[in-house]
């Protein structure tokens, strides 16, 4: 999913939940948007010099770490309990759900298993993926969500 869609979804859900404090907004953006920083690390270390950059950006190559896979629930749930705050769990779940809607190389049980999923409901870099951002934005301002 593109970053603008993650940002708009994070803001919309945060407003819907009535988030007020700066620390809660920080947690929402950390787990709802900034978790994608791992893409840059993977790109630099694995794909930058071997000419696969186009395949990487078309999501044909793995571009995710365990941070964006469902297996992370095993460290995120205790973190949310420790912080006594459901926000990390809510916004990480939102981020993972949105990423799983889009086609791409996903390994839900990595590093335990190499099982790979490639298909989602929306094709990667498609018109529908780009359309989702303004639609979410409009729904927020029309008070539908």
Image (cartoon, rainbow, N blue to C red):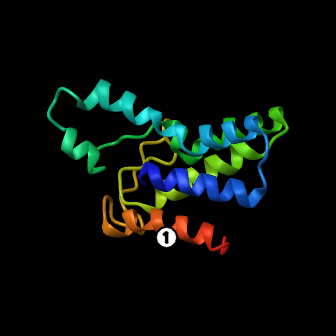
* Residue 16 horizontal/vertical position (percent): 73, 61
Q: In the picture shown, does residue 133 fall above or below 55?
A: below
**Residue found farthest to the front:** 141
* Residue 38 horizontal/vertical position (percent): 45, 33
Q: Quadrant of residue 83?
A: top right
Q: Quadrant of residue 64?
A: top left
Residue at 35%, 54% in the rendered image: 104
Secondary structure category for the residue under label 1? helix
Q: In the picture shown, does residue 96 fall above or below 53?
A: below
Neighbours of disc 1 within 10 Å: few (<14), some (14-19), many (20+)? few
Along the horizontal axis of the image, is 68 left or right of 50?
right
* Residue 72 horizontal/vertical position (percent): 61, 40
Residue at 39%, 64% in the rendered image: 129
Q: Quadrant of residue 103?
A: bottom left
In the picture, the quarter occupied by the C terminus is bottom right
In this figure, what is the number of numbered marks? 1
Residue at 40%, 55% in the rendered image: 117
Instruction: State the residue position of label 1.
Output: 135
- Give the camera-side residue of 129 and 137: 137
* Residue 85 horizontal/vertical position (percent): 81, 41
In the picture, the quarter occupied by the N terminus is bottom left
Residue at 63%, 59% in the rendered image: 12
Along the horizontal axis of the image, is 129 left or right of 21?
left
């Amino acid at each position: 999913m593109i970053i603008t869609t993650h940002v708009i979804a994070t803001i919309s859900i945060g407003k819907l939940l009535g988030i007020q404090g700066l620390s809660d907004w920080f947690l929402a953006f950390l787990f709802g948007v900034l978790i994608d920083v791992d893409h840059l690390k993977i790109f630099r270390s694995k794909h930058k010099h071997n000419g696969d950059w186009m395949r990487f950006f078309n999501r044909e190559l793995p571009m995710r770490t365990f941070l964006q896979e469902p297996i992370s629930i095993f460290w995120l749930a205790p973190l949310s309990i420790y912080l006594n705050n459901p926000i990390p769990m809510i916004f990480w779940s939102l981020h993972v759900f949105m990423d799983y809607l889009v086609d791409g190389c996903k390994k839900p049980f990595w590093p335990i298993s190499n099982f790979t999923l490639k298909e989602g409901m929306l094709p990667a870099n498609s018109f529908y993926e780009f359309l989702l951002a303004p639609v979410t934005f409009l729904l927020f301002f029309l008070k539908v969500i």
